[in-house]
Amino acid sequence: YTNFRNLFIVQSLGSSCSDYEKVTGLTKFQINQARRNLGKYDIRELRAAMDIIQEMEYGVKVGLIEEEFSLDYLIAQIV
């Protein structure tokens, strides 16, 4: 989830942002990791992936989804 969130933040700001660290609170490492994946997903896809991950996490925590199948399902939904 965190990597998608960081990518979402950096991609949302675009290239016009002069100080990503100050604006986002992310570290240089996190920003560089996100930049490597810029453009691989559009904003809607990133938001959808974050929503799917949150739903999956909730489902596992409350027992609606079996943990052993959750990763396979998650990958199938995002890819």
Image (cartoon, rainbow, N blue to C red):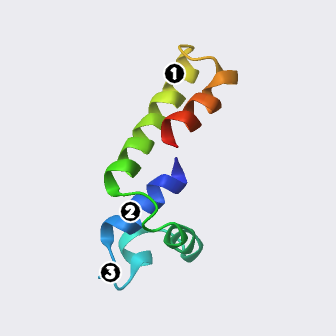
Q: Residue at x 40, y 51 (%)?
A: 46
Pointer 3 residue: 17
Q: Is residue 42 above or below residue 75?
A: below
Q: Residues within 10 Å of mark 2 (few under 14, many from 20)?
A: some
Q: Do labels 2 and 1 touch, CB within 8 Å?
A: no
Residue topped by disc 2? 9
Please state the horizontal and vertical placement of residue 44, each as a whole percent of the image. 32, 50
Q: Secondary structure at mark 1?
A: helix
> Which mark is on residue 51?
none
Task: Identify the secondary structure beneath mark 3.
Answer: loop
Q: Quadrant of residue 68?
A: top right
Residue with the mark numbered 1: 59
Q: Earlier in the sequence, mark 1 or mark 3?
A: 3
Under mark 1, the amino acid is: Gly
Residue shown at the point (51%, 29%) measured from the top left: 56
**Rounded to the nearest whole Å, what is the CA distance between mark 2 and mark 1?**
25 Å
